[in-house]
Structures are given as C-alpha cells and as structure tokens.
C-alpha cells in the first residue's frame, strides 16, 4: 500500500505527528527505521531520525466504512455496512437493510454513483489505483443473472436475422459481464461504443472474413 518516508527529531515524534495528521490508528500501519538519528555531540553533528511507513489495508477499510456511513445515514441510518478487501487493490463494501432500495436507485444508478464517489475518495488516500465494489442486498448477483438473460435474448435475435443489437447503457462492470458471457457464442462478436455514462455494448454476427486485426480492435473496445 502507500509508503511514506518521514524525518523528525525522534522516531516517537515522527509517529505521533504522523498519526495526528493522517487520522490513522495504531495497527493500521507498519514502519521501518532507516536511521534512528542522533543528538550529536554538544549539538554538533546532530542527525534527524528517518523512518519508512507503510499504510496497511486496515486503514483504507476503516476510512471507506466511515465514508459510506456518513453518506448512507442520509438515506437510512439503520443500514449495516461491512467492508473487506480481497487484496490491496480491491475493496468490497456490502450494505444490508430495509432502506437499500433508495440507495440502489433505478437500474442501479444510485448504487453506481455511490461506488464512483467512494472510489474517488479512497484513491485520494492511496498512491496506487484502488477499485471499490459496493453491493447492496446481493443486487449485483441478481443483476448478473439478468444480464445473462439479456445476452441470451440478444444472441437469439442475431441468429434470427438481426445484424446488430445495441444494449442499453451499462456500468463498466456490467459491460465486462456482457463480453464475458458472449465468449460462449462463437457466432457473434461484441464491442462497446459511446462515452460514459452512456457507453453501451453492441452485438453483431461474426462474419467469416473477420480477421485477427479486427478482433483485436474489438477486444480493445470491450470495456
């Protein structure tokens, strides 16, 4: 995770100031002493202490949970939030409660917006790219099954003569699911068009003269 190199009169002073400035708690970071420092001889040849601090995932989990609580309380302060990380780059938040429908919004737009601002918030605290995934009442799993059905229906239309099917605009994770599901249908190809938040997937019949270059180009757009 994020690493910082800090200097000060002593290791204790560095850690105290660091905790206060970052709002970080003991156990949410590790540190390595680079130089213990020295008071010198009668003030001469004095040397600052130097340590390298590594901020741990526990800090980001706590900050993400606090951020989400502050936002969600305006919808329903009884909603429960749990946060965990798969690794140092992907953080997952699960929210449960009777009021989650207000958060999910129509077609999941509210949930997508919350995830977007949560991702921005957490990335401002880190020096590596972090992905935030928010699931409300297993909405994503239900949405996944719906997308699977949408893909099956679109492929059926292509096989019945349609040359091109344009799906409704989707979030990036939903478009990835579409492209993934379509891999089992060798007679169709897909790519994404448009600009966020109106980017959508296009499904077409695969032609025999589709060459490798064309497929690579489409693969680049499968986002």
Image (cartoon, rainbow, N blue to C red):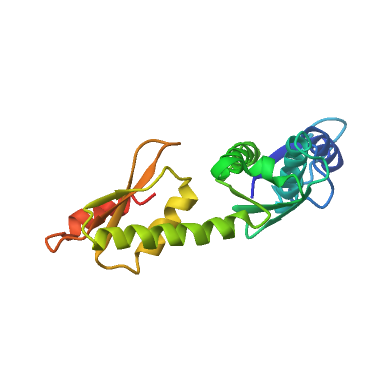
Task: Give the residue displayed 79% in from the left and 34% down from the top.
Answer: 46
Residue 156 rendering spot, x and y as whole percentages: 31, 63
Label count reads 0
Q: Quadrant of residue 214?
A: bottom left
The vertical placement of 148 against 99, above or below, is below
Q: Residue furthest top?
A: 43
Q: Is residue 88 visible?
A: no
Task: Give the residue displayed 19% in from the left and 60% down from the top.
Answer: 212
Q: Residue furthest left?
A: 209
Front position in the image: 8 or 187 = 187
The vertical placement of 161 against 60, above or below, is below
Side of 74 where 156 appears, left or right: left
Q: Quadrant of residue 205?
A: bottom left
Q: Is residue 99 visible?
A: yes
Residue 215 rendering spot, x and y as whole percentages: 23, 57
Task: Give the residue displayed 35% in from the left and 62% down from the top.
Answer: 182
Front position in the image: 94 or 40 = 94
Residue 72 rendering spot, x and y as whole percentages: 74, 39
Side of 129 where 57 appears, left or right: right
Task: Give the residue displayed 39% in from the left and 49% down from the top.
Answer: 223
Front position in the image: 207 or 159 = 159
Q: Residue furthest front?
A: 160
Front position in the image: 48 or 86 = 86
Side of 126 where 14 appears, left or right: right
Residue 143 rendering spot, x and y as whole percentages: 54, 55
């Amino acid at each position: 995770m994020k690493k910082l190199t800090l200097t000060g009169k002593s290791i204790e002073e560095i850690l105290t100031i660091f905790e206060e400035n970052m709002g970080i708690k003991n156990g949410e970071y590790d540190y390595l002493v680079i130089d213990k420092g020295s008071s010198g001889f009668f003030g001469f040849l004095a040397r600052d202490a130097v340590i390298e601090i590594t901020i741990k995932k526990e800090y980001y989990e706590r900050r993400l949970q606090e951020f989400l609580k502050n936002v969600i309380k305006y919808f329903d302060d009884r909603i429960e939030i749990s946060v965990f990380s798969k690794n140092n780059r992907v953080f997952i938040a699960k929210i449960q409660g009777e009021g989650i429908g207000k958060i999910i919004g129509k077609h999941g737009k509210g949930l997508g917006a919350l995830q977007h601002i949560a991702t921005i918030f957490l990335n401002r605290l880190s020096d590596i790219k972090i992905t935030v995934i928010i699931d409300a009442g297993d909405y994503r799993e239900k949405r996944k099954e719906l997308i699977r059905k949408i893909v099956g229906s679109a492929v059926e239309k292509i096989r019945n003569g349609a040359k091109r099917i344009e799906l409704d605009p989707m979030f990036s994770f939903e478009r990835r699911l579409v492209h993934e599901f379509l891999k089992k249908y060798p007679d169709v190809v897909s790519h994404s068009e448009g600009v966020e938040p109106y980017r959508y997937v296009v499904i077409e019949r695969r032609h025999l003269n589709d060459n490798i270059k064309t497929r690579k180009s489409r693969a680049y757009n499968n986002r």
